[in-house]
Amino acid sequence: MIRKKPEAIGGIIAQVLRDNNLEQTLLEKRAVDAWEKVIGQSLARYTDTPQIKNGVLFVHVKSAPLKQEFFLGRKEIVRRLNDAIGATIVKDIRLL
């Protein structure tokens, strides 16, 4: 990968991520990291760290009433998560 013209480091990093199929993994990590920001610290205390697999975010909720609230508002949470990371990565949420 010899370059003759100067390029921005951000562009080079983005190219390396695409070439090594790491872009999707990075976006999934950002979605998991955005969980607490999207739902808030007080509600995040009642959940374990979420995991994402094939576009589905799996979250263990420790409170039954809160689980019901998340279930009813899961489409809005999905939208806010995707907005927070700037890409459509999360397609659904499964509450455990």
Image: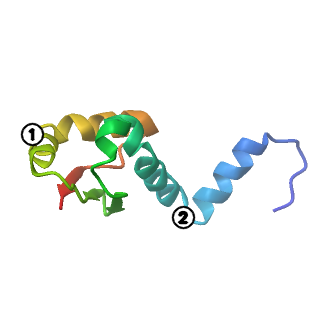
Residue type at numbered disc 1: Leu
Identify which residue is drawn at 25% across, 49% down.
91
Q: Is residue 23 above or below residue 21?
A: above
What is the residue that sits farthest to the right in this orientation? Answer: 4
* Quarter of the image with the C terminus in it: bottom left
Q: Is residue 77 above or below residue 58?
A: above
Foreground residue, 36 or 7?
A: 36
Identify which residue is drawn at 31% across, 63% down.
54
User: Where is residue 69 drawn, in percent x and y?
Assistant: 12, 40
- The image quarter in which residue 9 lies: top right
Q: Which residue is mark 1?
A: 72
Residue type at numbered disc 2: Asn
Q: Is disc 2 placed on a helix, strand or loop? A: loop
Identify which residue is drawn at 18% across, 39% down.
75
User: Where is residue 51 drawn, in percent x and y?
Assistant: 35, 61
Foreground residue, 34 or 69?
A: 69
State which tag comes first along the sequence, 2 or 1. 2
Foreground residue, 15 or 53?
A: 53
Q: Which residue is mark 2?
A: 21
Q: How is the image coloured?
A: rainbow
Q: Label 1: few (<14), some or many (≥20) within 10 Å?
A: few
Question: What mark, if any, has residue 92 been given in the picture?
Answer: none
Q: Is disc 1 placed on a helix, strand or loop? A: helix
User: Where is residue 2 drawn, in percent x and y?
Assistant: 86, 59
Nearer mark to the viewer, of 2 and 1: 1
User: Where is residue 5 drawn, in percent x and y?
Assistant: 88, 43
Identify which residue is drawn at 18% across, 42% down.
74
Q: Label 2: few (<14), some or many (≥20) within 10 Å?
A: few
